[in-house]
Image (cartoon, grey):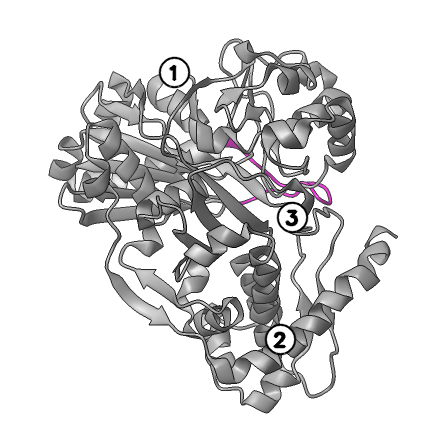
Amino acid sequence: MYLGIDLGTSALKAVLLAEDGRIVAQQSAPLEVSRPHPQWSEQSPADWWRALGIALTELARTHASAMRAVRAIGLSGQMHGAVLLDAAGDVLRPAILWNDGRSEPQCAELAERVPRLAQIAGNLAMPGFTAPKLLWVHDHQPQIFAKVAKVLLPKDWLRWKLSGEFFTDCSDASGTLWLDVAAREWSDELLAACGLTRAQMPALVEGSAPAGRLKRDVAERFGLNAGIVIAGGGGDNAASAVGMGAIAPGDGFVSLGTSGVIFLCSDRFLPAPQSAVHAFCHALPHAWHQMSVMLSAASALRWVTQLTDRRDEAELLAEVEALDERSLDQAPLFLPYLAGERTPHNDAQAQGVLFGLTHEHGAAALGYAVIEGVSFGLLDGWQTLDEPTRALARSLDLVGGGARSATWGRLLATLLDRPLTKRDGGEAGGALGAARLAWLADGGRLEEVCAKQAVIESFQPQPERRAALMSRYARFRALYPLLRDSFRV
């Protein structure tokens, strides 16, 4: 039995995975984001630990024998977050999250200090990444920066609480802007540019390697065995890829979570910083991936559901499903930049826009506009990825909360011109991948552990809708350049 823990932005999830590949049980606990100032996004690490306690306590209550049979633990989590510890291991301030936009000036400063940054880190300096956050703390909270003894990523703070040891994996470290992504090593040059050293970083391992052991007091609390291995784990998307069996060149998926992601595996480091593409290490050795990222996806659907006073997303999507083609073609256009944007614009100042509203537009039209706008944003990202790798991707998996919508699935399949498949266990996402990485750290064979899950639903492109959609896409693409300067007023 293997335990996978995924620290998301809106919830922490935990799964128990049997050695025949079955998910035996899963639990989750909700999390809230604090936004004390415009563009800020923070969470208290203490809330992560509380959520972990809720999830594991419930698993111990309902599946005590399975918890006693756990042989290893894997960790997955939201990337880029900055957890700052002092020499005693105490948290110095709330964690600054991946979708925090305050550090745009520090991004420019970092790029100026290290002209080779994009070549070493494989990515542009963006406010969501970890390094600019530390420069912001240096500039605005110098008394805190002076006390920083360790900088941890969110999942690795949980590892510290579980094991008392400091490790991270190469996939998660790729999102810091301190990693030489090709060499899979910390870059002293990039660390020095932020006033940091390797001593303040956790040790690096591959996601499938051992990285700490469970402390006795934690084991006793949750009905686990003391001393079991904790795997290196992975950033949320790399772990999700492992969970889906996306481990070979051309394998990939579309994620409709809080953020929107298109993920493609490769066997080479393929940086494309000019398009704001992310080039990261995979959670497995000798593997990398490209990723286009938009900051609002299913979170935009949640926003419009609340705006239209619908009970939940399912109620609004049922109204969207009932729209005829004329209503779809006359719906407003939506720029989905509610929290700024990464690929392809790299613009923390970008804002959401509903364009072309009339008296005829009701809740259903707004709901459609939002899922279409997110889909257009994902198509923007798809077109920035390495063309030969895209050609290998004959189909893509679909994961995340938005994958529950057949309407959204068909829309994305049509725009990307690829079948999209939902697989068994896809709702477990990074937690399933984390459990698989734990299995690998315990000696499992890659071919057995990372087999693709069974397809439970597929969405085919609709050629008859593509021409109308691409006409609307052309209008969508024209809006951002026209409005870009207005976002800065």
Q: Which mark is residue 308?
A: none
Callout 3: few (<14), some (14-19), or many (20+) C-alpha neighbours within 10 Å? Answer: many
Q: Which residue in the protein does label 1 denote?
A: 165
The residue shown at (35%, 48%) is: 246
Tag 1: amino acid: Glu
The amino acid at mark 3 is: Arg
Q: For the magenta stretch, what is the residue range?
A: 32-45
Q: Residue furthest front?
A: 388
Q: Residue at x 86, y 55 (%)?
A: 485
Prevailing secondary structure class for the magenta stretch in the rendered image: loop
Q: Position of residue 107 (x, y in %)?
A: 73, 33
Q: Which residue is mark 3?
A: 342
Give residue 432's quadrant in the image.
top left
Q: Quadrant of the N terminus?
A: top left
Q: Are discs 2 and 3 less than 8 Å apart at CB?
A: no
Amino acid type, callout 2 = Met
Residue 46 appearing in the image: no
Q: Is residue 115 left or right of residue 293?
A: right
Report the Cα–Cα distance between label 2 and label 1: 51 Å
Q: Quadrant of residue 5?
A: top left
Q: Secondary structure at mark 2?
A: helix
Whichever of callouts 2 and 1 sits on the residue coming sooner in the sequence is 1
Q: Which residue is mark 2?
A: 470
**Residue 40 forms part of the magenta stretch:** yes
- Report the residue at 41% width, 31% height from top: 49
